[in-house]
Structures are given as structure tokens and as C-alpha cells.
């Protein structure tokens, strides 16, 4: 989505909370998914990380290429 002039782009949140309800889980089973293919009902907190923060050993390789 384009921004108007002077507006900054929205950044993605650093943490995301995913909620899987029992209804969501049962719907997935009805669609033919196995329990290994789905998350169990509950709350899941996920962190978004920068690629180079997750794999700092690759940072040197990227610097050498540039």
C-alpha cells in the first residue's frame, strides 16, 4: 500500500500473538488435516526477528560480498 508524502510506513509488530480456538481446531480436522499439520488450541506468542539477527554468522559473508 502506498503512503502519502511525508508519512512513514507502518512497521510490523515485533511480537505477534496467535490464538487457536477449539472451533478452529475442529474445523481443520473436518477439512481433512491431521493433528500434526495444525497447532493445538491455545495461545502462541511469536517473535519476528531480522534475518541477520537470527543468523549472525552470515553477517560476515554479506559484508564480504558487498
Image (cartoon, rainbow, N blue to C red):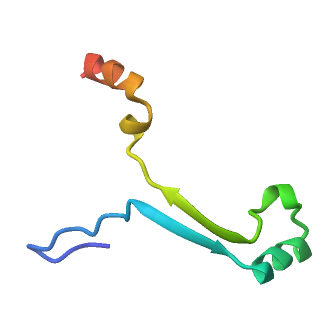
Q: Is residue 21 above or below residue 33?
A: below
Q: Is residue 22 left or right of residue 44?
A: right
Question: Looking at the picture, how far across and down is residue 2, in whole percent?
Answer: 26, 72
Question: Residue visible at 37% across and 35% down?
Answer: 52
The quarter of the picture where residue 32 lies is bottom right
Q: Is residue 33 above or below residue 54?
A: below
Question: Residue visible at 40% across and 22% down?
Answer: 57
Q: Is residue 5 left or right of residue 64?
A: left
Q: Is residue 53 left or right of residue 33?
A: left
Q: Is residue 33 above or below residue 63?
A: below
Question: Looking at the picture, how far across and down is residue 10, in whole percent?
Answer: 27, 69
Can you name the residue that lies furthest to the top here? 64
Question: Looking at the picture, how far across and down is residue 46, in whole percent?
Answer: 53, 58
Q: Is residue 19 left or right of residue 31?
A: left
Question: Residue visible at 69% across and 71% down?
Answer: 42
Say how many tags the image has.
0
The quarter of the picture where residue 63 lies is top left
Query: Which quadrant would the C terminus be assigned to in this image?
Result: top left
Question: Residue visible at 17% across and 69% down?
Answer: 8
Can you name the residue that lies furthest to the bottom here? 23
Q: Is residue 46 above or below residue 66?
A: below
The quarter of the picture where residue 55 lies is top left
Q: Nearer the viewer, residue 3 or 59?
A: 59
Query: Which quadrant would the N terminus be assigned to in this image?
Result: bottom left
Amino acid at each position: 500500500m502506498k503512503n502519502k508524502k511525508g508519512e512513514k510506513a507502518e512497521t510490523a509488530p515485533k511480537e505477534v500473538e496467535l490464538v487457536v480456538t477449539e472451533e478452529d481446531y475442529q474445523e481443520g480436522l473436518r477439512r481433512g488435516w491431521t493433528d500434526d499439520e495444525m497447532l493445538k488450541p491455545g495461545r502462541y506468542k511469536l517473535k519476528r526477528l531480522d534475518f541477520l539477527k537470527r543468523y549472525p554468522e552470515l553477517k560476515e559473508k554479506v559484508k564480504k560480498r558487498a
